[in-house]
Amino acid sequence: MTEPTPVNMDKLVSLCQRRGFVFPSSEIYGGLSGCWDFGPLGVEMYRNVKEAWWRRIVRDRDDAVGLDSSILMNPKVWEASGHVTSFSDPLVECKVCHLRWKADDLKENRCPSCGGELTEERMFNTMFKTFVGPVEDATSVVYLRPETAQGMFVDFENILSTTRKRLPFGIAQQGKAFRNEITTGNFIFRSREFEIMEFEYFVKPGTDDKWFEYWVEERLNWYLKLGIRKEHLRLSPHPKEKLSHYSKATTDIQFLFPHGWGELEGIANRQAFDLTQHAKASGKVLEYFDDETKEHYVPFVIEPSVGAGRCFLALMCDAYREEPDKDETRVVLGLHPVIAPIKVAILPLSKKENLTALARKVYADVRPHFMTQYDETQSIGRRYRRQDEIGTPFCVTVDFDSLNDNMVTIRERDKMSQIRVPIATLAKTLTAKLAGEDMLVLPEGGRVVVAK
Ligand code: ATP
């Protein structure tokens, strides 16, 4: 097994900015801490991440449905869920420079910035508040959701009755979440506005341990299938004394980020906590009727939850590599083709009119099938490097021979191997090549390490 090696964050941030993956939000005004924009390539990759998750969790399964609930909800939701009283982090403030810190993150009882003395901890609720309607008073306060899960719990009855699903079944949702984090940082790892991808899998009590194990394994495999190196992943089960009040078991999937091992995804056995709380607070019955046993019960729920941006960052970090190439260094994003923002680049060897005309025709043929880019600027070597750096799996070169033999060269990103194929079958060949990289098989290798 190769030693785990985290990528250098500065290099990654620079690539993201230079190539239009991620920019600081409202940068011309100095930015806004914890907020980021996904640029032209970033948004394509971000959509691919979300699409890969949605496909795996919802479309490829018979026991899952999707939901898109509103961001603003009745504030009673957040009272019942416990967020109003306990969605808080312990905050300390430096008595000298007045910077604020999340107490959990500090190794010593001193300000990491100036070494000053810190105040006592106080709890700080990290939900953002705003107002509905024209009057800004206590009765019109609403919250920007800090997670999407509660939308799925409060819609449980609507979904059950409209889909007639039997247990076990799950509800999936992706969407914006907002947390007024005390400290942000490590690029997009911890943001104040981010997208979260959550799945609530409802099961019969008593079968929950089995399903918890299933989802830990299934989610871990998803990352491996997306090509993340297994030495960059590990499982971190929470010790009993550190579990949230609602959780019977929680395991984090950690990734080796540039700043060290950090939570990528959390999988929790939330038992019947949420449905029970909402039933109590709303006065509605939130139960399941089991036709076979004729029992009514409140299902338990297993929840895998991951930030889309954090997943994006992990994929980027894992894919980034530098290789010696002649006298230069080749920077490659070895992204899985499902995730790569551009799948195919069409590159005429020169800007000669007859060549670009054919290349544009090839571009028009391929484009309906995959996200394709056409590029005729600079030398061919430089264009290959540009595509390597953004993770494009295949470059198609149209050269002078193509004018006579109607064939083009496909150059593959990782091995830089080249094959020549007829233009007539190019789209078919590329489809087969990209499908061969589909997410059906796990890469070779055993299980991922469990953190001590
Ligand atoms: P942490 O301990 O890092 O604050 P958490 O345990 O509060 O995270 P959860 O509430 O379990 O996080 O959130 C589920 C997932 O959402 C996390 O695994 C992470 O991928 C993502 N996430 C949480 N907070 C943020 C954030 N501020 N920015 C980006 N992603 C986040």
Image: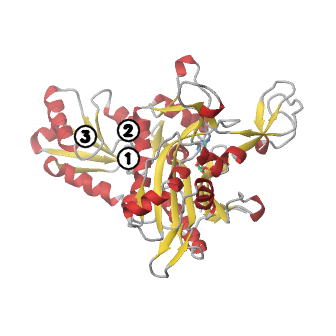
Q: Residue at x 44, y 78 (%)?
A: 291
Q: Where the C terminus falls, by quadrant? A: bottom right
The disc, 3 or 2, on the residue closer to the chain's N-terminal end is 2
Relative side of 423 to 41, left or right: left
Task: Specify the color scheme.
Answer: secondary structure
Q: Amino acid at mark 2?
A: Gln
The disc, 2 or 1, on the residue closer to the chain's N-terminal end is 2
**Who is closer to the viewer here, 312 or 134?**
134
Q: CA distance from mark 3 to mark 2?
A: 12 Å
Q: Where the N terminus falls, by quadrant? A: bottom right
Residue lying farthest to the front in this orientation = 283
Q: Residue at x 62, y 35 (%)?
A: 128
Whether residues under marks 2 and 1 lie with C-beta atoms below 8 angstroms apart, the answer is yes
Q: Amino acid at mark 3?
A: Thr
Q: Secondary structure at mark 2?
A: helix
The local crowd at label 2, few if under 14, some if 14 to 19, many if 20 or more residues have their Cα within 10 Å, is many
Residue topped by disc 3: 397
For disc 1, does the CB lie below 8 Å from ligand 1?
A: no
- The percent position of residue 415, horizontal first and vertical second, equals 39, 51
Quadrant assignment, res 449: bottom right
Relative side of 230 to 165, left or right: right
- The percent position of residue 200, horizontal first and vertical second, equals 52, 59
Residue topped by disc 2: 387
Q: Residue at x 37, y 38 (%)?
A: 387
Q: Residue at x 56, y 54 (%)?
A: 305
Disc number placed over residue 413 in the picture, else none: 1
Q: CA distance from mark 3 to mark 1?
A: 13 Å
Q: Secondary structure at mark 1?
A: loop
